[in-house]
Amino acid sequence: MDWIAAAAVGLLALTGLGMAWLNARSYGQELLTPSSLFVRSLTWTALSVAIYGVTTLVNWRWVRTFAWPLYAANILLLIVTLIYGVDSGGNNRAIAIFGLTIQSSELSKILTLVAISTALTRVDRAGGGLQDLLLAGLIVAPPFLLVVAQPDLGTAMVLVAALFGALYVSGVASRWIAALASLVAGGGVIAWVVVLADYQKERLLAFIDPNADPAGPKYQLLRSLEAIRGGGLFGAGVDGTATITPLPVQESDFVFAALVRAFGAVGGLFVIVLLAVLVGRLIWHSWNSSDEFGVIFAGGMATVVLFQAFVNIGMNLGVAPITGITLPFVSYGGASAVSLAFGLALVQSHRVHDGGSSPLM
Amino acid sequence: MTNPQVYPGGRGPSDREVRRRRPLRFFSAALILLLTFGGLGGRLMLLQIGASGSTSSTTTLARGHRIVEELITPARGLVYDRSGRVLAKNVAVYAVQIRPGDLSLTIRAQVVKTLGEILNMDPVRIITLLDRSTGSLWEPIRIANNVNERAARLINEERASLPGVETIVEARRVYPFGTLISHIVGYVGRIDAVEASTLAPAGYTVVDFIGRAGVEASYEEVLRGSPGIRQVEVDAKGRIVRVLGVTQPPVDGSSLTLTIDIEAQQRATTALEWGLKGSRTQEGVVASMNPQNGEIIAMASLPTYDNNDFSFGISSAKYQKYLSNKYSPLLNHTVGSYFPPGSTYKLVTYSCALNNNLVTPTTRFRSTAFVEVDGEKFYEWNRAGFGGSLTPAEAYSWSSNVVTFQLARLIKIDRLAACGRQWGFGALTGIDLPSEIAGLVPDQAWARTTINRGLYNAEVLQSAQGQGYDLVTPLQVLNSFSALANSGTLWRPHVVLHITDPSGAVTPVAPVVNAEVGMRESTYREMRIAGRKMALNPGPSQGISRMPLYVSAKSGTAQYGVRDDLGRLPFHNWMGGFVAPSNDWSKSDSTLAFVVFMHGTNTVGNAAKEVTKYYLQLQYDLKRDYRTPALLARGNFFGE
């Protein structure tokens, strides 16, 4: 058991709860009504903790055994979402089950990574691993396309990042990774010209010059930068932020800016350090794993967390495009937290049930 | 503790041992990790100390500060008279508003109490204003208007203890000539909450003003300009720390120059006021226009109102006083009221008969005391007739009812109505003033749908002399005589001469031809001569004949309402016509057509004629006085 990683996850989840409380206040919600951001966040956090605990205790090999049925179920869920999805702002990103809206794309990140790890474990890596690359690419393609169709550009990018991470740690030759990178870059150019809607392009480009159009979509970024500068070293405090106009989507996309405004650079660095520790532990586990699945899965998870953290914080700070990627555990976003909890706990399970180590040590 | 055997696919063959470690890859992964998070942390710290230049041209915001967008109200365009005198201008006044989002609930009571003392306002009233607002917490709510400078300064000094309270300087409309030309200039009023939502796409907010009457309303878009947007940095308490920049500069409104000269307007008003006073009545209209281009020269409608009353928020008592006055001072009767036209409508009847070849200029009609229609006797207005026989022009000059009845029987109602419409009656003139109404030209189709029967012969005779169902606005009468003067062109009358944009570029308002009357030139000439005969006829002219002006005109008396004890009906007086430059009536070069309307005069003579004489002697600066005040005496019902 990796207590350091567990502590980092726990502290991030607590920060997320704190931000949900702060944001609920900021939006003027009654804190303890069932519909308040805080109560909903509390529910999701409890669910995430439960899943984290249970998954840690269950042997990860069960998941590997059912990797393909789970992968198939995930594809099915994505298709169902596409057809029956809840319209949230024109996009079919979520489906509602028993009143809970579930963003199936979040879960697909983990289950796709499980499938890749399982598949790459079985391949003989002769010839630099071209078969590995092709196989992993084939596995990522269906969920990637379905997520793009929703359209959820952020998750699609995370999927691609996870693919790169997994291939990288599995030992595929650098030349093939470089080839894949060129392919993705080319695909990106084509997507820009053919697939992307204007609003998506505008969002992606906003970070280059937010002052160009303060009234348009770049307004979000301008407000974010303003909040971060306004936060100073120690922030405006909980009461100081209560009377300030909320930021755009400050519960998820711009949660980091809201956090810095309330708790200053110190609060921001705290979150950055927690995320760095978490990713560091994942890389460490990937290095130390005695079998291939552990190497690849932990490496993939490290990439997912690193990529999400970088893009989300980066867009808050104006150095990365605005893509709607959540900040792990700090952003409100039930499915995101639950999925990440599941994936990280799977790494924990791997550690617990790997060779001779004891589950509770 | 772990027993791999209990798990399917457990340890063993499916757990592939790692064959080759790749330290370089994990070392570089760790490096990426450090660089990524180190970079993010570094960027965060750089933003804090404001050293980052790449994405911020706006400099650092201090703790708790934020940027808000504010609308910059453009300066409203001014209104000038034809000679460049200012008729509507802007002056600065103070107002107080509160941004509720900056006023925390815990200190609200104290702030409101302090503010109430400064403004001499009931704190409960302030609270009510705050709570009644439905807008965003960040939209300022107006607390007080027209705040004096002392109070405004006090509030600014007390800023620290009054979070969310701001004083603003804003422009108010001042109308230097007030009542004299308020019906043309109009006024502005604050938009209400309902309008604010429908007008929001055009950039109006609840604190904005909008034109309500006159050219202030009809040229609202031109006068208003378009608002700009600026970004200001405000501190945690909502006070503006500095202006960051203008993201969209405002475009000031354009100014209007009227076709009306204030002195010409004064002449019309003076004549009308004298006539109303002499006849002890309240309501009337004197208006004139240039038949060559449709420009309004003067337009006086009485009673009037002071448009300055509205600029600073009219008191309810004063507004009620305006509304309860039965002569409707807020209404420009020239365009917004209709009345029976009386004998001025004989222009339609006589031109209709001539133009349709039902009569010739030399046809003679017997002038009898009455005609009998459907067994009922319809009398000449003098109950005697004018002796012998009359040509149409002679009958017109006497305003003979009996001859008009004979023409009506030849013309028939639907053709009469068609001729009425040809002269522009029953339709809007399209003047650039709001609230114009169209009036009514009755015909059989109208009668069948509206009163569910055909018109009786007697009603047809009434229509031919501008009574019965006929309803016209004074502006329509003016426009018909203007068209007579210029041989058939019905202009769209206009009060705005040109528009001057903020850069000084001048756009003239081009004259627009609404329609052509479409009669023969000989008909126009014959009618001009008939009107001239009327002006020269020693009896009906009441002295116009003595004036050194080439006037062609038609008088009218229009009965309305209910009979008095002696069986007499009250009546309005009319006078419509034009002044020609020479005695050549085949020409169509007049530059002044006029209409005078006097409501409910019941005078011995035609009160409108007296006002016409006075107006023309003022307008043409005649030295002699042609007025006959005795004719304004009440009593005799002189029913032409």
Image (cartoon, coloured by chain):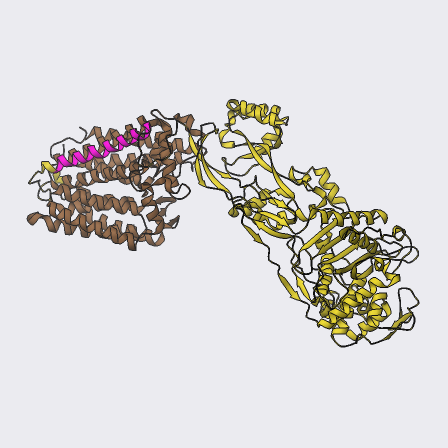
| Chain coloured yellow in the rendered structure | B
| Chain coloured brown in the rendered structure | A
The magenta stretch is B25-52
* Location of residue B458 with respect to B124 vertically, above or below: below
Quadrant position of residue A20: top left
Left or right of B480, for residue B93:
left
Quadrant position of residue A169: top left
Magenta stretch mostly in which secondary structure? helix
Q: Nearer the viewer, residue B376 or B215?
A: B215
Left or right of B333, for residue A231:
left
Q: Is residue B44 magenta?
A: yes
Q: Quadrant of the N terminus of chain B?
A: top left
Residue visible at 51% across and 26% down in the picture: B163
Total numbered labels placed on residues in the image: 0
Q: Quadrant of the C terminus of chain B?
A: bottom right
Q: Nearer the viewer, residue B398 or B613?
A: B613
**Image coordinates for residue B601, horizontal then vertical, percent:** 84, 53
Quadrant position of residue B462: bottom right
* Location of residue B638 with respect to A240 vertically, above or below: below
Left or right of B187, for residue A135:
left
**Image coordinates for residue B562, horizontal then vertical, percent:** 85, 56
Q: Is residue A250 visible?
A: no
**Image coordinates for residue A291, horizontal then vertical, percent:** 11, 39
Left or right of A243, for residue B76:
right
Residue visible at 74% across and 71% down in the picture: B523
